[in-house]
Image: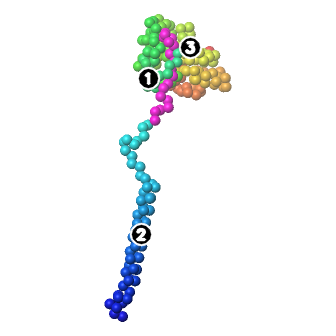
Amino acid sequence: MDIKVFWKRYNLYIAGGLFLIAASALAVLLFSRDDGAEAVEAFPVREFTEESEETPAEPLDASIFVEVKGAVKHPGVFEVPKDARVKNVLEMAQPDADADLLTVNQSMKLADEMVIYVPKEGETGEFDPAAGFGSATDAESDTININTAGIPELTTLNGIGEKKAQLIIDHREESGLFMAPEDLMNVPGIGEKTFESLKPYITID
């Protein structure tokens, strides 16, 4: 059959078929683009900038508790920032006029449950200025008997607060009396370094 004759007879069918093919291809292309856009919206990418970075939370233990005893106007337990120094808590406790501050290292950083003892001028007893606070002993006794002392006596020891004093008593009641001063290191929270600072001021007799 001649091509011209064929085209005259079937041109409408051919044109319609080409139109349907083109329309189908366009529909498929548009549908694919819509799916891609939805996928991007479903899984957005978060852009991190300096402004969007989260601010670190404040530490839970932002403060500590220390006790001040001796020649001060306001003895007791004080809550202070964890980076405070002995000088800061002494300003709160207000040393007496006859307080012997030469025995107190006011630049030392405080620690939780620390006991700061400020002696009076001329007060008897040994003091350790390097330790940052006064002697753990009082004027009437050179040492503390860790086998008989209660919480009030134990808390006069440097670095021994009420919690550690109670742990000492609990250990004593559960395990029996201390057979040697070194046994104090068996109490939770009291290590070798702490024991060495307490050793001159404790006894088992």
The structure residue drawn at horizontal position 48% and vertical position 11%, both measured from the top left corner, is 72
Neighbours of disc 2 within 10 Å: few (<14), some (14-19), many (20+): few
Neighbours of disc 3 within 10 Å: few (<14), some (14-19), many (20+): some
The residue to which callout 3 is attached is 143
Where does the N terminus fall, quadrant-wise? bottom left
Q: Is residue 54 left or right of residue 4?
A: right
Q: Splitting the image into 4 quarters, where does residue 41 fall? A: bottom left
Q: Is residue 2 left or right of residue 81?
A: left
User: Identity of the amino acid at label 1?
Assistant: Ala
Q: Is-magenta flag for residue 44? A: no
State the SS at label 1: loop
Return the residue nearer the eye: 43 or 30: 30
Neighbours of disc 1 within 10 Å: few (<14), some (14-19), many (20+): some
Q: Picture coordinates of residue 192 (x, y %)?
A: 52, 26
> Is residue 124 placed above or below 29 in the rendered structure?
above
The residue to which callout 1 is attached is 84
Of circles 2 and 1, the one toward us is 2
Q: Picture coordinates of residue 153 (x, y %)?
A: 58, 15
Q: Splitting the image into 4 quarters, where does residue 150 fall? A: top right
Could you give the CA–CA distance between mark 2 and mark 1, rounded to whole angstroms?
73 Å
Could you give the CA–CA distance between mark 3 and mark 2, rounded to whole angstroms?
95 Å
The residue to which callout 2 is attached is 27
User: Identity of the amino acid at label 3?
Assistant: Thr
The residue stretch that appears in magenta: 57-75
Badge 1 vs badge 3, beta-carbon distance below 8 Å: no
User: Identity of the amino acid at label 2?
Assistant: Ala
Q: Earlier in the sequence, mark 2 or mark 1?
A: 2
Q: Earlier in the sequence, mark 3 or mark 2?
A: 2
